[in-house]
Image (cartoon, helix red, strand yellow):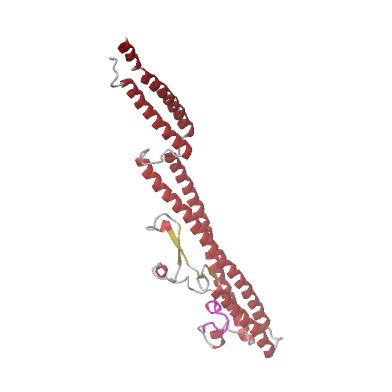
Amino acid sequence: MSLVINHNLMAMNASRNLSDSYGSLATSTRRLSSGLRVGTAADDAAGLAIRELMRSEISSLHQGVRNANDAISMIQTADGALQVIDEKLVRMKELAMQAATGTYNSDQRLIIDSEYQAMASEISRIASATDFNGIYLLNGNLSGQISDHNGQILAPTGPIKIHFGTGNDSSEDYYYIAIQAATSSALGLGHAAAAKTGTGDAVNAGKTVSTQGLAQLAMQAINDAIISKDKIRANLGSLQNRLENTITNLEIQAENLQAAESRISDVDVATEMTEFVRQQILTQSAVAMLAQANSLPRMAMQLIGG
Protein backbone atom coordinates (compact mmCIF):
# COMPACT_ATOMS: atom_id res chain seq x y z
CA MET A 1 0.00 0.00 0.00
CA SER A 2 1.40 3.40 -0.96
CA LEU A 3 2.13 6.06 1.59
CA VAL A 4 -0.38 8.86 0.80
CA ILE A 5 -1.75 11.88 2.66
CA ASN A 6 -5.01 12.67 0.75
CA HIS A 7 -6.76 9.42 1.72
CA ASN A 8 -6.03 7.53 4.91
CA LEU A 9 -7.53 4.19 3.87
CA MET A 10 -6.47 2.41 7.03
CA ALA A 11 -8.25 5.04 9.12
CA MET A 12 -11.34 4.71 6.93
CA ASN A 13 -11.29 0.94 7.35
CA ALA A 14 -10.85 1.24 11.12
CA SER A 15 -13.66 3.81 11.27
CA ARG A 16 -16.03 1.50 9.38
CA ASN A 17 -15.22 -1.41 11.67
CA LEU A 18 -15.70 0.86 14.68
CA SER A 19 -19.10 1.93 13.38
CA ASP A 20 -20.18 -1.68 12.87
CA SER A 21 -18.95 -2.79 16.28
CA TYR A 22 -20.45 0.22 18.03
CA GLY A 23 -23.82 -0.37 16.31
CA SER A 24 -23.81 -4.03 17.37
CA LEU A 25 -22.83 -2.94 20.89
CA ALA A 26 -25.77 -0.53 20.94
CA THR A 27 -28.11 -3.34 19.81
CA SER A 28 -26.86 -5.65 22.56
CA THR A 29 -27.25 -2.86 25.12
CA ARG A 30 -30.84 -2.26 24.00
CA ARG A 31 -31.70 -5.95 24.14
CA LEU A 32 -30.16 -6.45 27.56
CA SER A 33 -31.78 -3.34 29.01
CA SER A 34 -35.24 -4.15 27.58
CA GLY A 35 -35.08 -7.95 27.91
CA LEU A 36 -36.40 -8.28 24.35
CA ARG A 37 -34.63 -9.95 21.49
CA VAL A 38 -37.18 -8.52 19.08
CA GLY A 39 -37.50 -4.84 19.90
CA THR A 40 -38.11 -3.50 16.40
CA ALA A 41 -39.22 -4.95 13.10
CA ALA A 42 -35.61 -4.72 11.91
CA ASP A 43 -34.60 -7.33 14.51
CA ASP A 44 -36.98 -9.99 13.18
CA ALA A 45 -39.89 -8.86 11.00
CA ALA A 46 -41.63 -12.25 10.93
CA GLY A 47 -40.98 -12.82 14.64
CA LEU A 48 -42.45 -9.42 15.47
CA ALA A 49 -45.65 -10.18 13.54
CA ILE A 50 -46.04 -13.56 15.22
CA ARG A 51 -45.31 -12.05 18.64
CA GLU A 52 -47.95 -9.32 18.31
CA LEU A 53 -50.57 -11.87 17.27
CA MET A 54 -49.64 -14.02 20.25
CA ARG A 55 -49.84 -11.05 22.59
CA SER A 56 -53.35 -10.25 21.42
CA GLU A 57 -54.34 -13.89 21.94
CA ILE A 58 -52.82 -13.91 25.43
CA SER A 59 -54.64 -10.70 26.39
CA SER A 60 -57.90 -12.11 25.05
CA LEU A 61 -57.44 -15.32 27.03
CA HIS A 62 -56.83 -13.36 30.22
CA GLN A 63 -59.98 -11.32 29.57
CA GLY A 64 -61.83 -14.58 28.91
CA VAL A 65 -60.78 -15.77 32.37
CA ARG A 66 -62.16 -12.54 33.86
CA ASN A 67 -65.40 -12.97 31.90
CA ALA A 68 -65.80 -16.52 33.17
CA ASN A 69 -65.08 -15.40 36.74
CA ASP A 70 -67.74 -12.70 36.38
CA ALA A 71 -70.19 -15.37 35.22
CA ILE A 72 -69.34 -17.47 38.27
CA SER A 73 -70.01 -14.46 40.50
CA MET A 74 -73.36 -13.98 38.76
CA ILE A 75 -74.26 -17.64 39.27
CA GLN A 76 -73.27 -17.47 42.93
CA THR A 77 -75.48 -14.41 43.34
CA ALA A 78 -78.44 -16.27 41.88
CA ASP A 79 -77.71 -19.39 43.92
CA GLY A 80 -77.48 -17.36 47.11
CA ALA A 81 -80.92 -15.87 46.46
CA LEU A 82 -82.33 -19.33 45.70
CA GLN A 83 -80.94 -20.55 49.00
CA VAL A 84 -82.99 -17.89 50.78
CA ILE A 85 -86.03 -18.82 48.68
CA ASP A 86 -85.45 -22.42 49.77
CA GLU A 87 -85.81 -21.34 53.39
CA LYS A 88 -89.12 -19.65 52.57
CA LEU A 89 -90.39 -22.77 50.83
CA VAL A 90 -89.48 -24.88 53.82
CA ARG A 91 -91.44 -22.51 56.05
CA MET A 92 -94.41 -22.63 53.66
CA LYS A 93 -94.34 -26.44 53.78
CA GLU A 94 -94.34 -26.23 57.56
CA LEU A 95 -97.31 -23.85 57.51
CA ALA A 96 -99.20 -26.10 55.07
CA MET A 97 -98.57 -29.07 57.36
CA GLN A 98 -99.83 -27.05 60.29
CA ALA A 99 -103.00 -25.97 58.48
CA ALA A 100 -103.63 -29.49 57.14
CA THR A 101 -104.39 -30.94 60.56
CA GLY A 102 -107.91 -30.90 61.99
CA THR A 103 -107.02 -29.37 65.34
CA TYR A 104 -107.22 -25.78 64.01
CA ASN A 105 -110.36 -23.82 63.26
CA SER A 106 -110.98 -21.62 60.22
CA ASP A 107 -109.93 -18.39 61.95
CA GLN A 108 -106.63 -19.92 62.98
CA ARG A 109 -106.04 -21.21 59.44
CA LEU A 110 -106.59 -17.71 58.10
CA ILE A 111 -103.88 -16.51 60.45
CA ILE A 112 -101.61 -19.28 59.18
CA ASP A 113 -102.51 -18.39 55.61
CA SER A 114 -101.53 -14.76 56.19
CA GLU A 115 -97.97 -15.87 56.93
CA TYR A 116 -98.14 -18.31 54.02
CA GLN A 117 -99.01 -15.46 51.65
CA ALA A 118 -96.31 -13.28 53.20
CA MET A 119 -93.74 -15.99 52.45
CA ALA A 120 -95.00 -16.21 48.86
CA SER A 121 -94.76 -12.44 48.48
CA GLU A 122 -91.22 -12.48 49.89
CA ILE A 123 -90.21 -15.16 47.38
CA SER A 124 -91.47 -12.96 44.55
CA ARG A 125 -89.69 -9.92 45.99
CA ILE A 126 -86.39 -11.79 46.26
CA ALA A 127 -86.71 -13.20 42.75
CA SER A 128 -87.61 -9.81 41.30
CA ALA A 129 -84.91 -7.90 43.17
CA THR A 130 -81.94 -10.23 42.70
CA ASP A 131 -79.62 -8.72 40.11
CA PHE A 132 -75.98 -8.77 39.08
CA ASN A 133 -74.64 -5.57 37.56
CA GLY A 134 -78.18 -4.51 36.68
CA ILE A 135 -79.09 -7.88 35.13
CA TYR A 136 -82.09 -9.41 36.91
CA LEU A 137 -81.48 -13.10 37.39
CA LEU A 138 -84.58 -14.82 38.79
CA ASN A 139 -87.53 -12.90 37.35
CA GLY A 140 -87.58 -14.88 34.10
CA ASN A 141 -85.62 -12.41 31.95
CA LEU A 142 -82.86 -14.98 31.40
CA SER A 143 -85.20 -17.74 30.26
CA GLY A 144 -86.59 -18.27 26.78
CA GLN A 145 -84.85 -18.69 23.44
CA ILE A 146 -81.09 -18.25 23.01
CA SER A 147 -81.64 -15.97 20.02
CA ASP A 148 -83.43 -13.44 22.24
CA HIS A 149 -80.19 -12.45 24.01
CA ASN A 150 -78.12 -11.77 20.90
CA GLY A 151 -76.70 -8.42 21.97
CA GLN A 152 -78.51 -6.47 19.27
CA ILE A 153 -80.68 -4.43 21.62
CA LEU A 154 -79.95 -2.31 24.69
CA ALA A 155 -81.94 -4.44 27.15
CA PRO A 156 -81.85 -8.01 25.80
CA THR A 157 -83.70 -10.91 27.35
CA GLY A 158 -83.23 -14.65 27.13
CA PRO A 159 -80.23 -16.80 28.10
CA ILE A 160 -77.15 -14.65 28.69
CA LYS A 161 -74.09 -15.19 26.50
CA ILE A 162 -70.80 -15.77 28.35
CA HIS A 163 -67.89 -15.07 26.01
CA PHE A 164 -64.45 -16.36 26.92
CA GLY A 165 -62.82 -17.55 23.68
CA THR A 166 -60.54 -15.53 21.43
CA GLY A 167 -62.94 -15.77 18.49
CA ASN A 168 -66.67 -15.49 17.90
CA ASP A 169 -67.40 -18.12 15.31
CA SER A 170 -67.85 -21.37 17.20
CA SER A 171 -69.45 -22.81 20.31
CA GLU A 172 -65.96 -23.24 21.76
CA ASP A 173 -65.76 -19.48 22.25
CA TYR A 174 -68.92 -19.00 24.33
CA TYR A 175 -72.00 -20.59 25.78
CA TYR A 176 -75.29 -19.43 27.21
CA ILE A 177 -76.64 -19.39 30.75
CA ALA A 178 -80.38 -19.72 31.11
CA ILE A 179 -82.07 -19.18 34.48
CA GLN A 180 -85.75 -19.92 34.88
CA ALA A 181 -88.05 -17.67 36.89
CA ALA A 182 -88.21 -18.33 40.63
CA THR A 183 -91.08 -16.03 41.59
CA SER A 184 -93.93 -17.45 43.65
CA SER A 185 -96.22 -17.31 40.61
CA ALA A 186 -93.68 -19.26 38.52
CA LEU A 187 -93.38 -21.80 41.34
CA GLY A 188 -97.17 -22.05 41.55
CA LEU A 189 -97.58 -20.73 45.08
CA GLY A 190 -99.55 -17.92 46.69
CA HIS A 191 -102.40 -15.80 45.39
CA ALA A 192 -100.35 -14.84 42.31
CA ALA A 193 -100.11 -18.47 41.14
CA ALA A 194 -102.03 -19.37 38.02
CA ALA A 195 -104.95 -21.75 38.43
CA LYS A 196 -103.97 -25.36 37.76
CA THR A 197 -105.84 -27.84 35.65
CA GLY A 198 -108.24 -30.12 37.42
CA THR A 199 -111.53 -29.96 39.28
CA GLY A 200 -112.66 -28.59 42.60
CA ASP A 201 -109.98 -27.38 44.99
CA ALA A 202 -107.23 -28.89 42.80
CA VAL A 203 -107.26 -25.82 40.52
CA ASN A 204 -106.21 -23.71 43.52
CA ALA A 205 -103.58 -26.09 44.89
CA GLY A 206 -100.71 -24.09 46.38
CA LYS A 207 -102.50 -20.75 46.25
CA THR A 208 -103.72 -20.78 49.84
CA VAL A 209 -103.91 -22.86 53.02
CA SER A 210 -107.08 -21.22 54.31
CA THR A 211 -108.91 -24.56 54.51
CA GLN A 212 -107.78 -27.99 55.59
CA GLY A 213 -108.33 -29.43 52.11
CA LEU A 214 -106.42 -26.64 50.37
CA ALA A 215 -103.59 -26.98 52.88
CA GLN A 216 -103.32 -30.69 52.10
CA LEU A 217 -103.20 -29.93 48.37
CA ALA A 218 -100.65 -27.17 48.98
CA MET A 219 -98.18 -29.67 50.42
CA GLN A 220 -97.75 -31.38 47.03
CA ALA A 221 -97.64 -28.01 45.26
CA ILE A 222 -94.84 -26.92 47.59
CA ASN A 223 -92.97 -30.15 46.93
CA ASP A 224 -93.25 -29.46 43.20
CA ALA A 225 -92.00 -25.89 43.79
CA ILE A 226 -89.01 -27.18 45.77
CA ILE A 227 -88.17 -29.58 42.95
CA SER A 228 -88.43 -26.76 40.39
CA LYS A 229 -86.19 -24.58 42.52
CA ASP A 230 -83.70 -27.41 42.99
CA LYS A 231 -83.55 -27.94 39.23
CA ILE A 232 -82.60 -24.29 38.80
CA ARG A 233 -79.91 -24.60 41.46
CA ALA A 234 -78.60 -27.86 40.01
CA ASN A 235 -78.35 -26.25 36.58
CA LEU A 236 -76.51 -23.28 38.06
CA GLY A 237 -74.15 -25.60 39.95
CA SER A 238 -73.29 -27.54 36.81
CA LEU A 239 -72.69 -24.29 34.94
CA GLN A 240 -70.40 -23.06 37.70
CA ASN A 241 -68.39 -26.27 37.53
CA ARG A 242 -68.19 -25.95 33.77
CA LEU A 243 -66.99 -22.36 34.04
CA GLU A 244 -64.34 -23.33 36.58
CA ASN A 245 -63.07 -26.00 34.18
CA THR A 246 -63.12 -23.45 31.39
CA ILE A 247 -61.03 -21.06 33.48
CA THR A 248 -58.47 -23.80 34.15
CA ASN A 249 -58.24 -24.54 30.44
CA LEU A 250 -57.93 -20.86 29.52
CA GLU A 251 -55.17 -20.34 32.07
CA ILE A 252 -53.23 -23.32 30.67
CA GLN A 253 -53.67 -22.00 27.14
CA ALA A 254 -52.47 -18.55 28.16
CA GLU A 255 -49.49 -20.01 30.00
CA ASN A 256 -48.38 -22.13 27.05
CA LEU A 257 -48.93 -19.30 24.59
CA GLN A 258 -46.93 -16.98 26.85
CA ALA A 259 -44.09 -19.48 26.84
CA ALA A 260 -44.16 -19.63 23.04
CA GLU A 261 -44.21 -15.83 22.81
CA SER A 262 -41.27 -15.65 25.22
CA ARG A 263 -39.18 -17.97 23.07
CA ILE A 264 -39.73 -15.67 20.10
CA SER A 265 -39.50 -12.31 21.81
CA ASP A 266 -37.33 -12.51 24.92
CA VAL A 267 -33.56 -12.21 24.85
CA ASP A 268 -31.27 -15.01 26.01
CA VAL A 269 -29.28 -12.98 28.55
CA ALA A 270 -26.30 -15.36 28.67
CA THR A 271 -25.91 -15.43 24.88
CA GLU A 272 -26.50 -11.71 24.49
CA MET A 273 -24.07 -10.85 27.29
CA THR A 274 -21.41 -12.88 25.49
CA GLU A 275 -22.13 -10.91 22.33
CA PHE A 276 -22.05 -7.65 24.30
CA VAL A 277 -18.57 -8.38 25.68
CA ARG A 278 -17.33 -9.39 22.23
CA GLN A 279 -18.59 -6.21 20.63
CA GLN A 280 -17.26 -4.15 23.52
CA ILE A 281 -13.75 -5.58 22.95
CA LEU A 282 -14.02 -5.02 19.19
CA THR A 283 -15.16 -1.43 19.76
CA GLN A 284 -12.24 -0.71 22.09
CA SER A 285 -9.84 -2.33 19.61
CA ALA A 286 -11.27 -0.33 16.72
CA VAL A 287 -10.88 2.92 18.67
CA ALA A 288 -7.24 2.08 19.41
CA MET A 289 -6.51 1.15 15.80
CA LEU A 290 -8.27 4.26 14.50
CA ALA A 291 -5.99 6.38 16.67
CA GLN A 292 -2.98 4.54 15.28
CA ALA A 293 -4.21 4.84 11.69
CA ASN A 294 -4.76 8.57 12.09
CA SER A 295 -1.10 8.95 13.11
CA LEU A 296 0.36 7.06 10.12
CA PRO A 297 0.20 9.94 7.58
CA ARG A 298 2.61 11.82 9.81
CA MET A 299 5.30 9.46 8.50
CA ALA A 300 5.01 11.21 5.17
CA MET A 301 6.00 14.48 6.83
CA GLN A 302 9.35 12.98 7.67
CA LEU A 303 9.98 12.34 3.98
CA ILE A 304 8.84 15.85 3.03
CA GLY A 305 10.94 17.40 5.78
CA GLY A 306 13.89 15.28 4.76
How many dots with numbers?
A: 0
Residue in the image at 35% along x and 16% along y: 298
Relative placement, left or right, of 105 versus 226 is: right
Q: Which of 3/225 is in front?
A: 3
Relative placement, left or right, of 226 versus 174 is: right
Whether the magenta-drawn stretch holds residue 285 is answered as no
Instruction: Reply above or below: 272 against 228.
Output: above
Residue 168, position as x, y percentages in the image:
39, 58
Principal secondary structure, stretch drawn in magenta? loop
Residue 65, position as x, y percentages in the image:
49, 55
Q: Where is the N terminus found, in terms of image quarters?
A: top left
Question: Which residue is outermost to the front?
Answer: 305
Question: Which residue is outermost to the right?
Answer: 103
Q: Which of 258/299 is in front?
A: 299
Which region of the structure is painted magenta? 183-194
Quarter occupied by residue 272: top left
Q: Which of 264/82 is in front?
A: 264
Residue in the image at 58% along x and 73% along y: 226
